[in-house]
Image (cartoon, coloured by chain):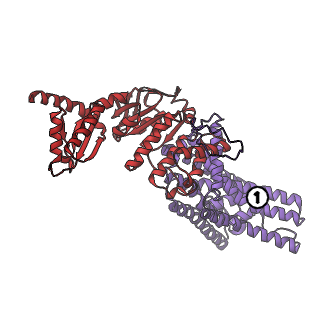
Amino acid sequence: MAVEQPLQVSPSGEQTRIHNIGYRTYDGPRLGRAYARRSLYSQSLRGAYGLGRSVKSKVLPMLLFVVMCVPAAIMVAVAVATKAKDLPVDYTRYAIIMQAVISLYVASQAPQSVSRDLRFKTVPLYFSRPIETADYVRAKYAALASAMFILTAAPLLVLYVGALLAKLDFADHTKGFAQGLVSVALLSLLFAGLGLVIASVTPRRGFGIAAVIAVLTISYGAVSTLQAIADAQSLGDGQGSAGAITWIGLFSPVTLIDGLQSAFLGAKSAFPGGVGPTNGEGVVYVLVTLGLIAAAYGLLMRRYRKVGL
Amino acid sequence: MIATESLSKRFPRVTALDRLSVDVGPGVTGLVGANGAGKSTLIKILLGLSPATEGRAEVLGLDVATKGGAIRERVGYMPEHDCLPPDVSATEFVVHMARMSGLPPAAARERTADTLRHVGLYEERYRPIGGYSTGMKQRVKLAQALVHDPQLVFLDEPTNGLDPVGRDEMLGLIRRIHTDFGISVLVTSHLLGELERTCDHVVVIDGGKLLRSSSTTDFTQTTTTLAIEVTDTDAHPDGTRAVREALHTRGVEVHEGSGLPGAGHILLLTAQGEETYDLVRDVVADLGLGLVRMEQRRHHISEVFKDSDEQQQRKEAVGHGS
């Protein structure tokens, strides 16, 4: 390198060359653990919508996002066009109606987020960096929960903006919108936790997808069937078995959120008979929801402590 | 760079490390041991990922038990197994790993481009890793270990799965990591031969115990064995025998390789230095034979210890013969 005297450029100045500049050391800042955790969070969040990945992996999450938003846009368009006095659906109800789409999203993206790292053994590389087990779990959990919040809150935003454009009651809709946001935030945390716990057990993406779908749909199917039976019986013999309907509702994630929001967030329950839990019963719903979220976090921590290097 | 003091790691069934005390200075250090000798366990402890059962260890002057995070910021690690997602490009992957090491986004991009060039990946770095050859994947793994410009890098079996040419290129690259980049290296292998050529210092462990820690020049003195193979000609129908006799008259002890098919055509002799190579060349040329191969034999780790026994026996045998 010293031999070729590259700096003696001919007077014309036209002579340009590419030189091997050799190895350069890095003396810049090293931003440490918190920054690494944020980097993993943003990479995982982008990954949940296929950004920074192949075109093929963008298709499904983007499609689901559109499917989530289109009905909201149609409702708004109808409300504005017909000068309706209110939106056809409550903010809190929207996610319950669209739960199949949400389940599909978490089933496809939770394995994408964690099973890939297990399958291709990238996890040890992460742990050879400044981050710890807890940082990995928190970044992945937060990323998927955020992705789901974006998915579930975006249509609510469409509804809210539409309601304001249609000059519907401002205070009423702001309150409903806020309640809806709290509800979908809890739903995102719950679904992301369940999805990640299931997906983190298997390095096979296909198994992960099938298992998440199975857990979410089978539990919902079983619970709503049992609730319907309980409802039919209560109508038949005239005795109030609304209590049974309420307690059965604790056993599937969708009905859990439904019950919780009808007790505290002013939602109309989608339970058969439209009878949601009372405030007292609602406390149990909140405790179970928070307990499940905490349990999911705890299980993930335990899982990754074992994976290590 | 690394110092351990009666470091032990016991699992319920096995003892992976048994009161290991070693000191590793700057430069390229080879960590040799058979599979299951405790190499990977040692690296895990040194990265602060697995607590030692007893004893202590320091990396770059930082205690592994308490300063794991700080150590991992200044140290690079290349695992033995595959660790690359196939659906992203080398550039994207290494940039991400650089950020995971704490480099700001702009610096991460710049360092990634530099590092991939240094390990020998050019245009292909924009293609998904899934389509890479084993050699290219090894280079990506090496790049992600170097991208944050560590002071020390742990390479776990970097030559695994490579063909002889790939092996030599990788070993050359490892040498350059120290000489050109100024980064110290701890490289593991179960092949002593290849580490002899690359390392300044070799640490041998077996069953979690330190067997030997010395500079490579000590090793080569005792272990350089030359394997030679020659052609037959009309004048010398059995070229192998002719060479053996010719060398014998010049006072070089030659024995035939054994154990492997075709080994009868391979002669083994102990190289005393440069002059042995010249002697072999001259003898073969004088006889008019073709030299098919003359190579340093790759030693398996167990031979280091067997060899000293054998030499002892051979000396005795020679003593009896004369």
Quarter where residue A152 is shown: bottom right
Residue A270 is at least partly visible in this image? no
Quadrant where the N terminus of chain A lies?
A: top right
- Left or right of residue B202, residue B265 in this image: left
Kindly identify the residue that appears in the image at 88 percent across and 57 percent down: A171
Q: Residues within 10 Å of mark 1 (few under 14, many from 20)?
A: many
Q: Which chain is red?
A: B
Image coordinates of residue A148 in percent, x first then y, are: 67, 57
Image coordinates of residue B238 in percent, x first then y, are: 15, 48
Residue A87 is at least partly visible in this image? yes
Farthest residue to the front: give it: A11
Q: How many marks?
A: 1
Quarter where residue A159 is shown: bottom right
The amino acid type, in three-letter code, at marker 1 is Gly
Image coordinates of residue A295 in percent, x first then y, are: 58, 48
For disc 1, the marked residue is: A180
A20 or A60, which lies in front? A20
Quarter where residue A93 is shown: bottom right
Farthest residue to the left: give it: B321
Is label 1 in a helix, a strand or a loop? helix
